[in-house]
Amino acid sequence: MFCLHICYFIFLNYGKKKLITNFEHLERLSNRSRYVARSCKEIRDRYNEQEDGLYYLTTANGMVYQTFCDMTTAGGGWTLVASVHENSINGRCTVGDRWSSQQGNNLNLPDGDGNWSNRNTFGTAEGATSDDFKNPGYYDIKAEDMSVWHVPNNFPLDHWNLAAILRYHTNNRFLRLYGGNLFQLFKHYPVRYNIGSCSNRGPAVPIVYDHGDRETTRMFYGLKPRKEFEPGFITFRAINNERAAMAICSGVKPIAGCNTEHYCIGGGGYFYPDQCGDFPSFDYDSLGMGQGWSASKEMTEAAVLLFYR
């Protein structure tokens, strides 16, 4: 009987402490909505926040939106602005392929949905590994560098950092040359069918690895593509043999051949029929086998998260 009373007392006190702790945590998260900043870097610098998580930002026009801030990598201050998520590797420019075309493989729509260079927004930050995501920061923030995380599909936000198969960032302030964001960069380098030959690609920017390295990047792709790229870069607006444009070769730079559909993501509205989609031809030989031209299962089933700082 004595133990019963003591145990009940301990249980009640534990419950009260846990309730207080949860309340304090929620109150602290709620207080973030009072911050006034256009980027996670401004939140870090102005309010000395150092915890990863969801924060509220405000555009130059006063629009308030929520996104994820990486406050720990390489000094922190990274703003999540977009994610590219392949919802169906077997779909060919079908519903959900927002970073290429949801309107079919159409020669008359060379830009596809055009989301690399427009102000459309979609998705939620918390669901960025479960669906495509793009917030106003994509075109509003003036940044200097990019960070990229490859996170397995459907992982919850709290575990993105540890779950990522690759994480890397640039550190040479290259975005200053292109208006400060991808919205402006892709004005310089349109993601459009028949824009030129495969030698007419955009800039290739060296990266610093936060998790993974050149060799692990190489091994996430098929045997044949490994002979055509060099790991350790982010490349913009790559063009393949069929003159289809892909937006980003994330983690690599094409150096030989023009088969970029096997390792670059996003694109315009027209490809060779078997290539169209957000991950255009990652499953060319067989899904997720990492053989021939096909990318590995790990790479095919991971969302690509894009950050600015």
Image (spheres, rainbow, N blue to C red):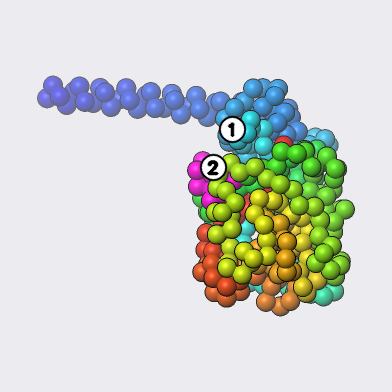
**Mark 1: secondary structure:** loop
* Kind of residue at badge 1: Thr
- Is residue 183 shown above or below 98? above
In which quadrant is the C terminus drawn?
top right
The segment highlighted magenta reads: 157-167
Structural crowding at the residue carrying mark 1, measured as other residues with C-alpha within 10 Å and reported as few (<14), some (14–19) or many (≥20) = some
Q: Foreground: 133 or 222? A: 222
**Mark 2: secondary structure:** helix
Q: Foreground: 130 or 160? A: 160
Is 297 one of the magenta-colored residues? Answer: no
Provide residue 93's location: percent of width, then percent of height.
70, 70
Q: Quadrant of residue 219?
A: bottom right
Mark 1 and mark 2 residues within 8 Å of each other at the beta carbon? yes
Question: 186 left or right of 208?
Answer: right
Provide residue 122's location: percent of width, then percent of height.
70, 52
Residue at 75% in and 58% down: 247
Residue sitting farthest toward the bottom: 273
* Kind of residue at badge 2: Asn
Q: Foreground: 265 or 134? A: 265
Residue at 67% in and 22% down: 47
Q: Which residue is mark 1?
A: 72
Residue at 54% in and 74% down: 286
